[in-house]
Image: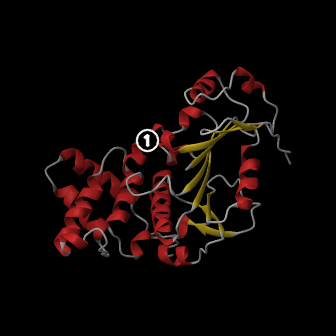
């Protein structure tokens, strides 16, 4: 399920998130790519130090990587499926892992007859180069450090946004397999949650089972594909009338007055109920 937190920059959204994660029981994964959570004393994982290809991959890994790379295309996942079926029985291919799965899939895509796929494969190779001297950590080792009650801050130093999305999706997919559910925090990271990338990722990541606290400055950045998973909304000072119109589709009684909220003021709604409250948080 999703808690959608919307409002202008410095309206109080990040402060609310920090309060909410204190009471969460499952692992909290904070995607802190803008260093807004440096004051959270907890474990840290730097995606910029991980080479995902130091460990074997399976089909779900291929889908996660495919989702991070390209929008509305499943070429890498489909080619990976072909490779896996060549190496194991068809009933086992979804779970079978192999070291060079992605490389073999890219070779097939590059050498195939589909020119669009050829171009995508060639372009993808430069974003799947994680062989820098500092990128020597193994993904499984980092995941094994995470325990049920942990709050983990994820950094992404030195990575292109596409590489960050690839590794983020791969990490979340793997963590979903380890824990019954996880809580994911994303504060104004628009490039992670585009509909085109969620086209494939939503096939392997359970947005109902897991909890997501997604914060956006503008509602136009919230992906249409995830609307059905929204459970709660937290509305801070809004940017414009289009934000007001966004919430009206859920029958939320919000109007232009929300554009004049004080810093720290917000209203909270549960989409299954009526207005819960109108609290105000104290800004530091």
Residue 95 at x, y percent in the picture: 31, 72
- Callout count: 1
Does residue 157 appear in the picture of this structure? no
137 up-or-down from 27: above or below? below
- Front residue of 2 and 129: 2
- Front residue of 271 and 210: 271
Does residue 59 appear in the picture of this structure? yes
Q: Residue at x 32, y 76 (%)?
A: 99
Residue 276 at x, y percent in the picture: 73, 39
Callout 1: SS: helix
- Front residue of 174 and 33: 174
195 up-or-down from 1: above or below? above
Q: Residue at x 54, y 32 (%)?
A: 220
Q: Is residue 116 left or right of residue 263?
A: left
Q: Residue at x 19, y 75 (%)?
A: 87
Q: Residue at x 50, y 46 (%)?
A: 193
The colour scheme applied to this rendered structure is: secondary structure
Q: Is residue 78 left or right of residue 172?
A: left
Which residue extends farthest left?
113
Mark 1 is surrounded, within 10 Å at the Cα level, by few (under 14), some (14 to 19) or many (20 or more) other residues, namely some
- Front residue of 159 and 71: 71
133 up-or-down from 2: above or below? below
**Label 1 sits on residue:** 195
Q: Is residue 230 left or right of residue 107?
A: right
206 up-or-down from 260: above or below? below
Residue 47 at x, y percent in the picture: 54, 65
Which residue extends farthest front?
273
Which image quarter: residue 263? top right
Residue 70 at x, y percent in the picture: 37, 48
């Amino acid at each position: 399920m999703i808690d959608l937190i919307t409002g202008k920059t410095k309206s109080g959204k990040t402060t609310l998130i920090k309060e909410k994660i204190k009471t969460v029981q499952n692992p909290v994964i904070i995607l802190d790519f803008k260093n807004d959570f440096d004051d959270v004393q907890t474990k840290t994982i730097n995606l910029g130090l991980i080479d995902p290809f130091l460990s074997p991959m399976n089909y779900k890994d291929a889908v996660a990587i495919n989702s991070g790379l390209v929008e509305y295309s499943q070429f890498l996942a489909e080619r990976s499926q072909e490779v896996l079926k060549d190496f194991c029985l068809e009933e086992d291919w979804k779970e079978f892992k192999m070291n060079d799965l992605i490389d073999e899939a890219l070779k097939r895509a590059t050498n195939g007859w589909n020119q669009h796929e050829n171009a995508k494969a060639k372009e993808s190779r430069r974003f799947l180069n994680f062989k820098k001297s500092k990128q020597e950590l193994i993904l499984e080792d980092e995941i094994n450090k995470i325990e049920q009650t942990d709050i983990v801050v994820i950094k992404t130093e030195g990575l292109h946004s596409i590489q960050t999305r690839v590794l983020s999706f791969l990490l979340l997919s793997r963590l979903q397999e380890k824990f019954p559910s996880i809580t994911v925090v994303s504060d104004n990271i628009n490039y992670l949650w585009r509909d085109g990338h969620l086209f494939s990722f939503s096939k392997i990541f359970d947005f109902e089972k897991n909890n997501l606290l997604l914060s956006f400055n503008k509602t136009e950045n919230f992906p249409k594909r995830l609307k059905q998973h929204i459970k709660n909304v937290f509305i801070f000072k809004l940017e414009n009338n289009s934000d007001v119109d966004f919430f009206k589709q859920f029958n939320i009684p919000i109007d232009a007055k929300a554009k004049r909220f004080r810093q720290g003021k917000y209203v909270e709604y549960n989409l299954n109920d009526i207005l819960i409250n109108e609290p105000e948080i104290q800004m530091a």
